[in-house]
């Protein structure tokens, strides 16, 4: 679990967003029956003192820093990194990602298509052009990769951690409700999704 913003410590449905996201990861680990080691990557350990798991002190927004923390943590064959700001992600998305890690595939992450109109804006806040939305995808989590596919000497990456140049990557469909909470204003939207999920569960 990567804590990439203080927003993760805000309250959603009587729990912090982090706790809700962490509980999803824990539920997935129970469902699989596979031996797993839950961990939270965070800059300050005191922020997660109430969670019973391994704590990786690093900068989760820095791929090289997160990779180094993973390398120094409990040994493993597979690494699944979930964004702490995606509290409504379902365990089915976790299963979908890890099940796609077959054959010679080294890394997998969920993605979805953009439905909004995308505009390119210059430094003067002037719209320059419309971007072909089919040329881009919205990335979700968890990102699942083989430990052996992580480039521990790498720096920048569009993934949570640098991947080796020859790593074979794949994608799976992301669920619509696996939204990322980026601001306090978006928590209200998430509250409505929580209510919807609970209503569906009752039916």
Image (cartoon, grey):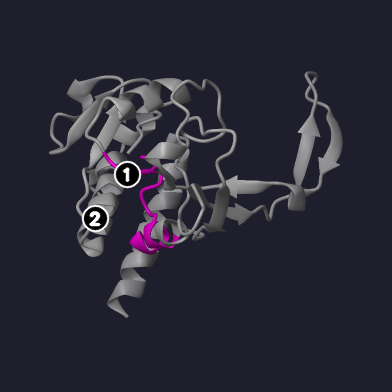
Please provide percent x and percent y for residue 185: 46, 39
Is 14 situated left or right of 188 in this image? left
Closer to the chain start, of discs 2 and 1, is 2
Disc 1 marks which residue? 77
Disc 2 marks which residue? 29
What crowding class fits label 2: few (fewer than 14 Cα within 10 Å), some (14-19), or many (20 or more)? some
For the N terminus, the image quarter is: top left
Q: Nearer the viewer, residue 92 or 6?
A: 92
What crowding class fits label 1: few (fewer than 14 Cα within 10 Å), some (14-19), or many (20 or more)? few
Q: Nearer the viewer, residue 180 or 24?
A: 24
Q: Nearer the viewer, residue 171 or 201?
A: 171
Q: Are marks 2 and 1 in contact (CB under 8 Å)?
A: no
Please provide percent x and percent y for residue 152: 43, 25
Q: Is residue 13 magenta?
A: no
Please provide percent x and percent y for residue 73: 24, 29
Residue 121 visible, this orientation: yes
What is the quadrant of residue 120 in the picture?
Answer: top right
Is 141 situated left or right of 167 in this image? left
Element at label 1: loop
Residue 62 visible, this orientation: no
Which label number is shown at residue 39?
none
Please provide percent x and percent y for residue 112: 59, 55
Is 115 situated left or right of 191 in this image? right
Q: Is residue 82 above or below residue 24?
A: above
Q: Residue at x 41, y 38 (%)?
A: 148
What is the quadrant of residue 5 in the picture?
Answer: top left
Q: Residue at x 38, y 39 (%)?
A: 147
Q: Is residue 83 magenta?
A: yes
* Residue extending furthest toward the right: 128
Q: Residue at x 50, y 50 (%)?
A: 108
Range shown magenta: 76-96
For the C terminus, the image quarter is: bottom left
């Amino acid at each position: 679990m990567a804590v990439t913003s203080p927003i993760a410590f805000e309250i959603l449905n009587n729990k912090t967003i982090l706790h809700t996201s962490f509980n999803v990861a824990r539920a997935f680990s129970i469902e699989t029956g596979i031996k797993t080691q839950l961990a939270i990557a965070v800059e300050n350990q005191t922020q997660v003192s109430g969670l019973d798991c391994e704590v990786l002190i690093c900068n989760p927004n820095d791929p090289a820093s997160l990779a180094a923390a993973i390398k120094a943590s409990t040994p493993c064959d597979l690494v699944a990194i979930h964004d702490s700001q995606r509290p409504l992600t379902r365990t089915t998305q976790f299963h979908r990602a890890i099940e796609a890690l077959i054959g010679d595939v080294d890394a997998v992450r969920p993605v979805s298509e953009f439905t909004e109109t995308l505009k390119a804006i210059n430094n003067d806040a002037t719209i320059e052009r419309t971007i072909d939305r089919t040329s881009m995808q919205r990335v979700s989590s968890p990102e699942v990769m083989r430990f052996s596919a992580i480039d521990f000497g790498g720096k920048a990456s569009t993934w949570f951690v640098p991947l080796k140049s020859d790593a074979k990557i794949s994608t799976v469909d992301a669920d619509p409700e696996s939204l990322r909470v980026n601001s306090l204003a978006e928590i209200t939207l998430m509250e409505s999704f929580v209510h919807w999920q609970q209503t569906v569960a009752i039916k």
